[in-house]
Image (cartoon, rainbow, N blue to C red):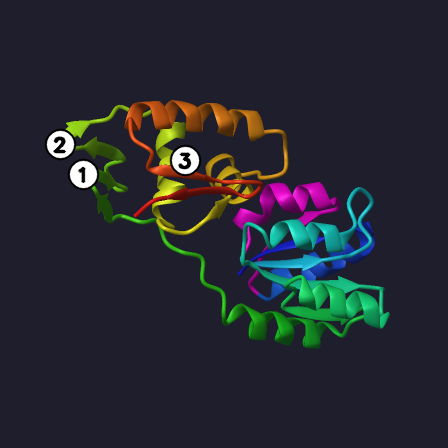
Amino acid sequence: MRTLIAEDDEALGRSLQDVLSANGHQVTLVSRGADVLLRHAEAQVILLDLGLPDIDGLEVLRKLRRVDDVVVIVLTARDDERSVVLALRLGADDYLTKPVRLAELLARIEASARRYRRSAPDGTTYEVGGLRIDFGLRSVTLDGTTIHLTPIEFDVLAALARRAGTAVSREQIQDEVWGDAFVTKSKALDVHLHQLRGKLGRPVITTIRRFGYRLEP
């Protein structure tokens, strides 16, 4: 398992890293919430401390769940009922309080990871109303005419096409295309969407006010 540990106690973080590595995990250790938001796509499991120095762990979890369903196990000193309930409602797969028995931690990771499914790259095509997108060839045609898109424009269109007919948040698009939904990329997305709409020449991308966008099926 590719495991990301977010822990600001260096000694504890190294101890967890050693144990998990010895049990076959590929471990990355970070100490800030911002690092989790930047590197979550590399992981299959995240061990998340709530007391991180830059961003509260619950806020990290809330942002993470807007873009990713990676397994998240909260590992923290907070044992109050409010924190437990809030973390689980925000989408944590499990909640463990420190100190934790390592055998139990390994068992909890294994149990939670059984549901892990990160979608494989899509090698199929999408077609609707004369628009054809070939994900494998990264090509787009409209009524039989090739539409020349930049790599970023194609990635934005692909992010919408894979969820055609469904509202997709700005954060999901930014996370999928740029690998980071929470740094100042909003203007870049606006620019690329404007160019993309101009090249497609028809209103196939609908704006969902204060949320995101939808590719009309």
Nearest the eye: 147 or 3 = 147
Q: Secondary structure at mark 3?
A: helix
Which residue is at a point 78% across and 71% down the rendered structure image? 100
- Residue for badge 2: 144
Label disc, if present, on residue 156 of the rendered structure: 3
Write down the residue under mark 1.
130
In the rendered view, tell whether residue 94 sits above or below residue 42. below
Tell me what residue is drawn at x 65 percent, y 64 percent. Answer: 92
User: Label 1 neighbourhood size at 10 Å, few (<14), some (14-19), many (20+)?
Assistant: few
Query: In this image, 23 relative to 59: left or right?
Result: left
Residue that appears at 61% across and 41% down: 38
Quick one: label 2 or label 3, which is nearer the N terminus?
Answer: 2
Q: Which mark lies nearer to you, 3 or 1? A: 1
Q: Amino acid at mark 1?
A: Gly
Horizontally, residue 36 falls left or right of residue 76, namely left
Rendering quarter of residue 102: bottom right
Q: Which residues are magenta?
A: 24-43
